[in-house]
Image: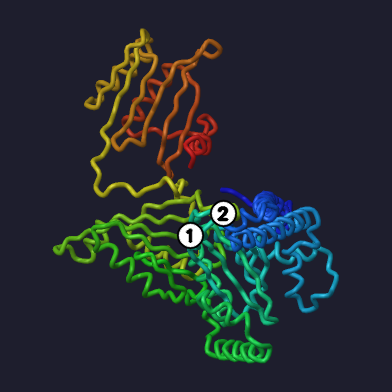
Amino acid sequence: MTQHNTSESICIKRTRKRIVNLLWAVLFLFVALSLLAYAASSWTSDRSYWEVMDWATAILSAVLGLAALAAGLYESVTSVRDAFFPAKSRLAKSIRSQLPYPEEDIPVKKLFAMVDKDILENGVWFDRVAVGREWILGDDAAYIPRIRAVFGRDEIQRRKINGRTITGEVIQIYTIDDRKQVQVTGLRNPNELKQLLECLRLRAPDALFLPYEKYLDYAAKSQEEWDTLNREFQSRKARREMDTPASDAAEGQSMVFTRPDGTDTSRVTEDMVISTLRDAIRSDDETLFTLAPTVPCEAGGRKLSFLQCSVLGVDDPDFDEDDLKDEAEIYLIAGVKPEPGHPPETGLVLDCAYDEAERILLDWFHGQAPDVSRWMPINIRAWEPPQKNPDPQPPKLALESASGVFQSHESFEREDVEASAEGLRDGTYKLVNLILPGGYLSFRVEPGDKTDGRCTVTATSDGDGSLRFYTLKCSEEQAAQWLLDYYDGKFRPAKPEWKDITKKIYKQIGV
């Protein structure tokens, strides 16, 4: 599980990263130099040249060059200011502007600490934007109780430069507060914008959520019109608080539900979750749906940011509901809260029956995290549900003789395992690897080295409901006896004799 380093302020890190914008400053200055040089050379040319010269192009080059020069100087100054003088940074100014007394000279550490605390305790990250209970942290900070209007922007922009068309995508979120101040934050991933807006609808239920096309109209409203908008906001808030029962939190209103078709809603109910699970077991295709709370849940020392249900159902009209529940393959995947700004990678998965899945989903809906002691760690990006009704992997007995001859058998009896054990005792075999049907339970014996003549045994066990890896060094006689016990299902690794290396193995395979 990745942890956010709390030794340094998140806001301070954000302001220091502004130094990267110096690269933009250099680009702007280079463009400015090129355009101004072109305009100057055109201006000093003889009159005969100007008789065929496009004056509009020369003038436009000069204007664009001055604009690029201004942009380059602005980025240079603000990047250095934000990185080395955080008290005067854009982020600090946006926080101060939303305090009850903006003119109050609050130390920058205390100023940033207000936002840091909220984001660390309650923050949900979408791309490079964090949403807490009170603050949104992006390029600017926005105080959620003051937000009156929110505008999401996802546009493809096309510009012509030197005859070439340059295409770029602009992804931003604009908020306007009760003082008619605007906060703007850019994103990189367009898929995160929709989820960010859905989360904000939960945190700021009385604000207006409007398309970006209406932003300029709202930004240009007169103070009188804005006062009216503030009164309407307070009226909506009062009506909502009167109509909302005290048990609203138990009704799942702080949960975002992603349906199997990929659409999101915050108006999720118990019936919606159960009916989706019930429909999923009737489909022959994989069905996925997700419940993501606005505040991560604690479970087993981890913060879980979402619970996803993967269902491989059965499309058979002859099956009744009980048959469908028995035959369906259901996996619950809990995502561990990642490092801020990074996609989720680490997770936990549980292969469970229908009734257990239903219970866990309803508990999660009501804010109760599951007991994850039996859940397997996975890499979410790499994990895929097993194929439905796959052919079980056959057992395998691999042997390597003392002379280096290797042989592998998929069809063998206990007598063959007994012969392998005897070969370990008398030195006929230096390596024996027994893999039981299914492919995940294995017992491997490897020879010792010059410094330690004992052989090394590595074995897997699922005795506690999860797959674990164990190892020890022992004599060939002892390894031979354990090999037979393993084949007979009598293997029980006892500590401290057997060393548990599960965490090491999972780390090696990237889980």
Within 10 Å of the Cα at label 1, are there few (<14), some (14-19), or many (20+) other Cα atoms?
Answer: some
Q: Considering depth in this image, is 242 or 366 the residue closer to the camera?
A: 242
Q: Is residue 79 above or below residue 137?
A: above
* Image side of residue 322 versus residue 145, left or right: left
Which residue position holds label 1?
A: 370
Residue 235 appears at what percent x and percent y? 59, 91
Which residue position holds label 2?
A: 302
Colour scheme used in the picture?
Answer: rainbow
Residue 160 appears at what percent x and percent y? 52, 58
Q: Residue furthest top?
A: 403
The three-letter amino acid code for the residue at tag 1 is: Pro
Residue shown at 29%/20% (left/top)?
Answer: 418
* Image side of residue 1 versus residue 310, left or right: right
The three-letter amino acid code for the residue at tag 2 is: Arg
Within 10 Å of the Cα at label 2, are there few (<14), some (14-19), or many (20+) other Cα atoms?
Answer: some
Q: Considering depth in this image, is 400 or 88 the residue closer to the camera?
A: 88
Residue 277 appears at what percent x and percent y? 33, 66
Picture mark count: 2
Residue shown at 49%/37% (left/top)?
Answer: 502
Task: Residue 408: tell me if it is visible.
Answer: yes
* Image side of residue 285 versus residue 3, left or right: left
Q: Secondary structure at mark 2?
A: strand
Q: Quadrant of residue 176?
A: bottom right
Residue shown at 23%/66% (left/top)?
Answer: 321
Rounded to the nearest angstrom, the CA distance separating label 1 from label 2 is 11 Å
Q: Quadrant of residue 86?
A: bottom right
